[in-house]
Image (cartoon, grey):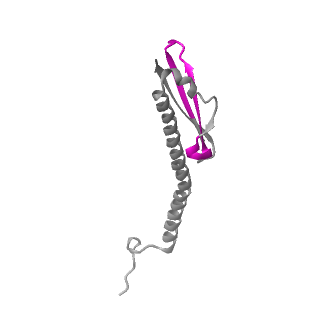
Amino acid sequence: MTRMMRWNERGMTLLELLIAMMLLATALVGLGASFPLAMIGVNVGGFQTTATLLAQQSIEIAKDTPYALLPTLDTGGFIIVPAYGAGFTRQVTVLPANPNPNTTTVTAVVRFTGGAGGINDTTIATIISQ
């Protein structure tokens, strides 16, 4: 006795299997294409963290310096940070604060190139009183 198969009793056809494989391949290619961009983001984040630590180090040095010697910390321009290579440069600016003559503004700017190839600046400023 032969029995006719109804539509819902059949297995997957070859066409359905090919369509499912194409959809899966398209999704995996899109995911794979985003991976290099994520790695660039992680790389730039590492550079940003290092630049922030270098700027904070400059501010801490200024806080430990006697008030009369603060102007000697002014670098006048960007200098290469020796411990971190040519990718990082640091500039420290010491200016008297305008409203109060007994205060000084210290600004540390760390410039770095890396990751996406652009130039990025990290700036930290503080006011030190006499």
Residue drawn at x 38%, y 85% is: 2
Magenta includes 89? yes
Q: Nearer the viewer, residue 36 or 77?
A: 77
Rendering quarter of residue 75: top right
Q: Is residue 33 left or right of residue 64?
A: right
Q: Residue furthest left?
A: 1
Image quadrant where one finds the N terminus: bottom left
> How many labels, in total?
0
Residue drawn at x 56%, y 57% is: 33
90 over 29 or under it: above or below: above
Q: Residue furthest bottom?
A: 1
Residue drawn at x 41%, y 74% is: 11
Magenta includes 96? yes
59 over 128 or under it: above or below: below
The x, y position of residue 43, in whole percent, is 53, 49
The x, y position of residue 13, in whole percent, is 47, 73
Q: Nearer the viewer, residue 9 or 78?
A: 78
74 over 30 or under it: above or below: above
Residue drawn at x 53%, y 17% is: 97
The x, y position of residue 93, in whole percent, is 58, 26
Q: Nearer the viewer, residue 59 or 69?
A: 69
Rendering quarter of residue 64: top left
What's drawn in magenta, residue-wise?
A: 81-109
Q: Nearer the viewer, residue 26 or 113?
A: 113
Rendering quarter of residue 12: bottom left
The x, y position of residue 17, in whole percent, is 48, 71
